[in-house]
Image (cartoon, grey):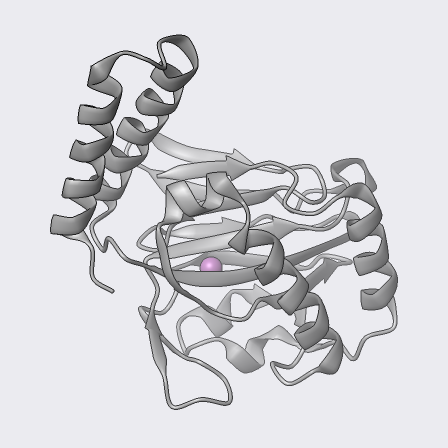
Amino acid sequence: MMLAIPAVLSHEEVRAFRQDLRDASWRDGRATAGPVAERVKANQQLADDDPVAAQLGSLILERLARNERFLAGALPLKVLPPRFNRYAGGGVYGDHVDAAVFSVPGSPHRLRSDLSATLFLSEPDDYDGGELVIDGEFGPTCIKLPAGHMALYSARTVHRVTTVTRGERLAAFFWIESMVRETERREMLLELDDAIRALRVDTPDHPSVVRLTGLYHNLLRSWSQT
Ligand code: NI
């Protein structure tokens, strides 16, 4: 599953984000990588308790809580507070997999990573390289979205960020535990949801709209963990 979610943040918001991130306390990104990933990781990150990260992260969570596409695609149960990274001057993150379980900072809770999210904060023209590449059944998918747009993809994948050879690439990244753990079920629910939305526009009074909506909710009821 790969979903592009447009305009999570407005142009003004991403511009303000970049301003705030410019003077933030960047650290070596290897601090949060496991022994396999640290060998291929060369970027910078903000510490989890960095006040800039906390402030910008909560604004992202606020926007996502009202984003219909995100809610329909992720069916989120828990969202890890967003982290921030920066790739510049040869920064790269080679092939790796994301951890399956994350501790929620400042709490005794843990989160299972069903979905990974990358929210692009730099405009694509402002840097070369820096593509998010996700390996899939039909080969690799290269992703480079406009600033403020977000890529949502299965956390089970092998993926990488290609070398940034010009400019800088700023992004927020985080993980989501879904109410529906199985990718295939989540995809079917999104497909059904999309089809019902289209019918509600074209034939809003057809009695099958209510029956299909009932079917969607009954499947969600069977498959969700809350
Ligand atoms: Ni990753």
- Residue at the spot 26% in from the left edge and 20% down from the top edge: 209
Is residue 35 in view from this perspective?
yes
Q: Quadrant of residue 37?
A: bottom left
Which residue is nearer to you in this view: 50 or 166? Answer: 50
Q: Is residue 12 left or right of residue 86?
A: right
Task: Name the spot of residue 106 as percent of width and height, x first.
Answer: 51, 89
Position of 16 with respect to 158 (left or right) is right
Residue 31, relative to residue 57: is it above or below?
Answer: below
For the point 63% across and 45% down, which residue is it? Answer: 8
Q: Is residue 74 left or right of residue 225?
A: right
Residue at 56% of width from left, 82% of height from top? Answer: 31
The quadrant holding residue 199 is top left
Q: In this orientation, does residue 133 appear?
A: no
Q: Position of residue 83 (x, y in %)?
A: 60, 69
Quarter placement of the N terminus: top left
Quarter containing the C terminus: bottom left
Drawn side of residue 157 relative to residue 34, left or right: left
Give the percent coordinates (x, y) of residue 9: 70, 47
- Residue 93 higher or lower than 141, as above or below: below
Residue 145: percent from left, percent from top: 64, 37
